[in-house]
Image (cartoon, rainbow, N blue to C red):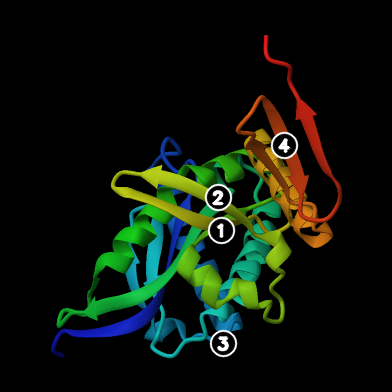
Amino acid sequence: MEAQWEYRAVLAVDIEKSSGRGNVALLRNRDALRTMLGEAFRRSGIEWDACVRDDLGDGLRVTAPALTQKASLVHPLVHELADLLREHNRAQSHPQTRIRVRVALHAGEVCLTSSDGVAGSPLEILARLLDAPPARTALARAPESVPVSLLMSQHFHDETVRHGYPGIDPAAFRKVGFTLKELTADAWLHTPGWTPPQEPEAKASAKKDAAKKRDRRQGNTKMVNKASGNGVIYAAQNGDQHIRITPRP
């Protein structure tokens, strides 16, 4: 077929700490992940054989078929994949055959080439999301029973999670920022089955935002202005005006 541009949802998945396990374990884990990911797609009503799949070495990149409902890649797909991974890991007696993964989600105009390949800038963004520090850190800090960290682009979040479609809890996603190579972006982090503790900076920012919203509701916006004389004038939109005069030395 001729090369054509189409809007598609794209997903990438990468096995955590895959290096150092040896070739036999690597190949076994790759095959197991591919099988579980295909099953998760089928359970989500997305035809696995209609997806364009690209090998990433210790993971996969999947371009979903045209007209796929993007929300279905969050739920049930990611949650189904997490369940399958938990079941798989419980049956493994050796740590080398247990699998935990990072998942990235994005969508945009990609080029479907004549060689059945996929190209375009959305794939570059997807690669950065997959390698972004927030996703790596969340999975490293999560309990061993948590097999997935998901990082999605702001665009993907805006079109899926924020609407609160069935099975998707917007409160379970946390906004994070990251810089990787040439990309500086906001993204949304989700670890099914576990809520990461907020970093101190995030807690302070959330507290400040809550105080601002509370002041706006109560009409307590405060203005501080320097007086033309000696002193400071404090004025509130609703309430008394207090003037303190500082004597000239």
Point out the frontmost of discs 4 and 3.
4
- Marks 1 and 2 in Cβ contact (< 8 Å): yes
Residue drawn 59% across the image and 48% down it: 98
Residue 45 tag number: 3
**Looking at the picture, which amino acid does disc 4 mark?**
Ile
User: How many other residues sit within 10 Å of disc 2, few (<14), some (14-19) or many (≥20)?
Assistant: some
Name the residue carrying label 4.
233
Residue 43, quarter of the rendered image: bottom right
Q: Is residue 68 above or below residue 123?
A: below
Element at label 3: loop
- Marks 4 and 2 in Cβ contact (< 8 Å): no
Q: Is residue 13 above or below residue 136?
A: below
User: What's the distance in space between the residues labelled 1 and 2, CA to CA?
Assistant: 6 Å
Name the residue carrying label 2.
176
User: What's the distance in space between the residues labelled 3 and 1, CA to CA?
Assistant: 24 Å
- Marks 4 and 1 in Cβ contact (< 8 Å): no
- First reached walking from the N terminus: tag 4 or tag 2: 2
Question: Is 95 in front, or is 108?
Answer: 108
Element at label 2: strand
Element at label 4: strand
Name the residue carrying label 1.
188
